Amino acid sequence: MNIVLLGPPGAGKGTQAKKIVQEYSIPHISTGDIFRKNIAEQTPLGKKAKEYIDQGLLVPDELTIDIVKDRLMQEDCKTGFLLDGFPRTVFQAEALDLFLKELDKAIECSLLIEVPRENILVRMTGRRMCKNCGASYHVTFNPPKVEGKCDLCEGPLVQRKDDTEATVKERLKVYDEQTQPLIDYYAAQNKLIEIDGTQDIDVVFDKAKDVLKRFE
Ligand code: AP5
Ligand code: MG
Ligand code: ZN
């Protein structure tokens, strides 16, 4: 199954991605996680990406697309993959479609997790993220079993630098202007399926499984 997760910042893409990839044994490809890893390791890519991420802006397409292409060529993507946070512009979506076509593959479903704006700020400011594996928690809605420690890998939980109120507002603006058009892009290909992201994490996951079983 070749799946794209779509939705505004804080919709719960990362949260659902962790559950989906466990259920279907496919790799989770999050461009945000890849950039954050590079920032932590202070690689040249990380240094460039940081300038944009800290401001809530998108990292330029030319830096982003090749990373995803390289990742999709790896052996573990043969039987499927889950893209989280990519594509984020129509240009990225077109580049992805072209690239997959060369490999005789295609995106089968774009799963849109919709959450109204009023829920987003409280989700983002209460988010804690595992420094090791990128798993998301929330101080109220999804606390870890042991405070400050990841349930999956015991890594330390930290706050993301771009989760401040001002940066979240900028990210939402960028989403509206540059990523929202992807809803029409995938709807036109008959690949868009929307789920309500306001319910409990497990309820959202049940809905996601219900949709994804068609692509098993
Ligand atoms: P990225 O890391 O992708 O961030 P994002 O898209 O802004 O999305 P988030 O990770 O903030 O939200 P999420 O939907 O994953 O929510 P989560 O599950 O964590 O990108 C970061 C930056 O990198 C971008 O701004 C950009 O600069 C750059 N970038 C990345 N990809 C790029 C690309 N393709 N092109 C260019 N630039 C790119 O959940 C949020 C919180 O809510 C958590 O606390 C969670 O516990 C809680 N929560 C989740 N579900 C529920 C629920 N059902 N009920 C209650 N709480 C919930
Ligand atoms: Mg995420
Ligand atoms: Zn972890």
Image (cartoon, rainbow, N blue to C red):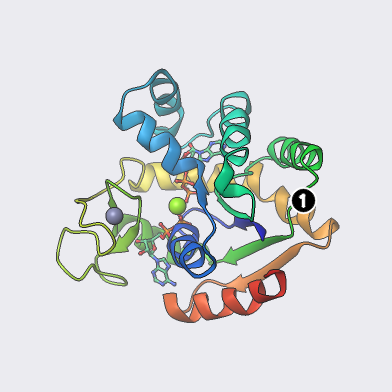
141 to the left or right of 146: right
In percent of width and height, residue 155 lies at: 21, 52
Quarter of the N terminus within the rendering: bottom right
What residue sits 48% from the left and 81% below the top? 203
Tell me where residue 103 appears, x and y as whole percent: 76, 40
Q: Can you tell which quarter of the image residue 154 is in? A: bottom left
Residue 11 seen = no
Q: Amino acid at mark 1?
A: Ala
Q: Mark 1 sits on what residue? A: 106
Left of 35 or right of it: where is 180?
Answer: right
Residue 2 percent coordinates (x, y): 67, 56
Foreground residue, 195 or 149? 149
The residue located at (72%, 56%) in the rendering is: 183
Compared across the picture, whether 185 is left or right of 81 comes to right
Residue furthest left in the image: 147
The secondary structure type at the circle numbered 1 is: loop
Name the residue at the front extreme: 75
Instruction: Mark 1: give few (<14), some (14-19) or many (20+) Cα within 10 Å.
Output: some
Residue 202 image offset from top left, x and y in percent: 44, 79
The image quadrant where one finds ligand 3 is: bottom left
Q: Give the image quarter of residue 35.
A: top left
Q: Quadrant of the C terminus?
A: bottom right
For the point 53% across and 30% down, the residue is 59
Q: Residue 90: in sight, yes or no?
A: yes
What residue is drawn where x is 46% and y is 42%? 32
